Amino acid sequence: MFHEYRDLVTELKISNAHFKKVFDEHNDLNDQLEKAEAGGVDHIDHLEIEKMKKAKLKLKDEAYAMIMDYKHSKN
């Protein structure tokens, strides 16, 4: 996620605990979704997958906003 901001992400993960939490939660959800969509998890229905996708997108938006704030604060 956010490969074009790799350096900023690394800095934020070290300096901002909230960013690290959001980033890690996003990655965890991504892993869970990949398993669920590949059929690796039997007990997740389509509604739960949709909820997970929305939560993942919300986390991504939050992380992106923090990256942009951090980027602009450095200029």
Image: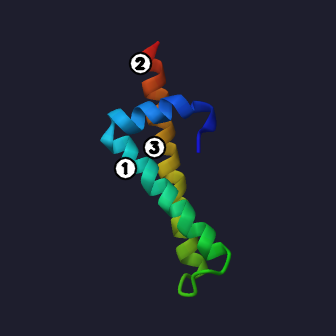
Q: Give residue 73's quadrant in the image.
A: top left
2 or 1: mark nearer the eye:
1
Q: Residues within 10 Å of mark 1 (few under 14, many from 20)?
A: some
1 or 3: mark nearer the eye:
1
Q: Secondary structure at mark 1?
A: helix
Residue at image position (43%, 16%) is 74
Q: Most extreme residue toward the right, as rendered? A: 38
Most foreground residue, 46 or 34: 34
CA gap, disc 3 to disc 2? 17 Å
Most foreground residue, 70 or 3: 3
Task: Kindly identify which residue carries mark 3.
Answer: 62
Residue at image position (44%, 27%) is 69
Say whether disc 1 or disc 3 marks the residue closer to the N-terminus.
1
Residue at image position (58%, 68%) is 33
In percent of width and height, residue 41 lies at: 57, 82
Q: Give residue 39's quadrant in the image.
A: bottom right
Quadrant in which the N terminus appears: top right
Task: Kindly identify which residue carries mark 2.
Answer: 73
Q: Is residue 46 left or right of residue 75?
A: right
The amino acid marked with disc number 1 is Lys
Q: Secondary structure at mark 2?
A: helix
The amino acid marked with disc number 2 is Ser
In percent of width and height, residue 75 lies at: 47, 12
Residue 73 against residue 20 in the figure, above or below: above
Task: Kindly identify which residue carries mark 1.
Answer: 21
The amino acid marked with disc number 3 is Glu
Say whether disc 3 or disc 2 marks the residue closer to the N-terminus.
3
